[in-house]
């Protein structure tokens, strides 16, 4: 692609891009991409667009290529990233929290992270769960069941 490349946009796309800043619903990233497309449509050079918008030339070329190959939506918005599935769903998390808020199993004075993970599997709350998952879950709910709360009472003197 030449540095003075003029991008041909449809009238509908031009109207949609022009209306975006006034709506106030889009993220700064989407608005920046719309600004790139608007300036490329005016015939500005890639170097000028990159300097004016504050992005690299590669970013300008990528947005331009995505518009040409996949259309306006693809140029403005990113495709969803796969990411890793959560280890526990909401119901499983709630059941584990409820279990921890109760008393520990017989023979135990208090809950430990390892004990919680083992008990959650034994009680069939989850098929399997790791200690780190339990630790993060407890931390997010500000629970520390392994701590024994000490209550100091002032004695009565006679």
Image (spheres, rainbow, N blue to C red):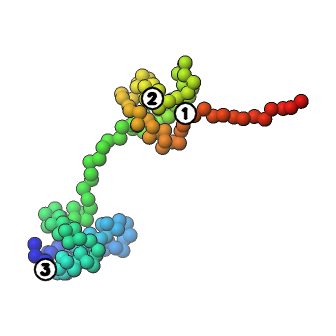
Q: Please report whichever mark, 1 or 2, sits nearer to the chain's N-terminal start.
A: 2
Neighbour class for label 3 at 10 Å: few (<14), some, many (≥20)? few
- The label number, if any, that marks residue 145 in the structure image: 1
Q: Which residue is mark 2?
A: 114
Q: In front of the other: label 1 or label 3? A: 1
- Locate residue 110: give its quadrant: top right
Q: Which residue is mark 3?
A: 4
Specify whether residue 12 is in view: no
Query: Is the residue 63 above or below the residue 47 in the image?
Result: above
Specify whether residue 30 is in view: yes
Q: Is residue 139 left or right of residue 103?
A: left
- Locate residue 12: give its quadrant: bottom left
Q: Image point 15% across, 66% down: which residue?
A: 65
Mark 3 to mark 2 CA distance (whole Å): 63 Å
Q: Image point 35% across, 65% down: which residue?
A: 27
- The label number, if any, that marks residue 86 in the structure image: none
Q: Is residue 102 left or right of residue 63?
A: right
Secondary structure beneath disc 2? helix
Mark 1 to mark 2 CA distance (whole Å): 12 Å
Mark 1 to mark 3 CA distance (whole Å): 65 Å
């Amino acid at each position: 692609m030449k540095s003075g490349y003029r991008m041909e946009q449809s009238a509908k796309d031009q109207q949609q891009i022009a209306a975006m800043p006034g709506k106030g619903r889009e993220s700064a990233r989407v608005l920046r991409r719309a600004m790139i497309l608007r300036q490329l449509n005016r015939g500005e050079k890639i170097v000028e667009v990159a300097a004016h918008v504050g992005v690299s030339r590669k970013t300008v070329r990528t947005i331009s290529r995505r518009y040409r190959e996949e259309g306006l939506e693809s140029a403005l918005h990113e495709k969803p990233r796969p990411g890793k599935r959560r280890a526990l769903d909401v119901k499983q998390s709630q059941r584990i929290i409820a279990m921890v808020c109760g008393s520990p199993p017989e023979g135990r004075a208090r809950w430990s992270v390892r004990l919680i993970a083992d008990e959650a599997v034994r009680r069939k709350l989850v098929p399997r769960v790791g200690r780190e998952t339990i630790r993060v879950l407890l931390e997010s709910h500000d629970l520390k069941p392994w701590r024994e709360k000490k209550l100091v009472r002032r004695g009565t003197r006679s």
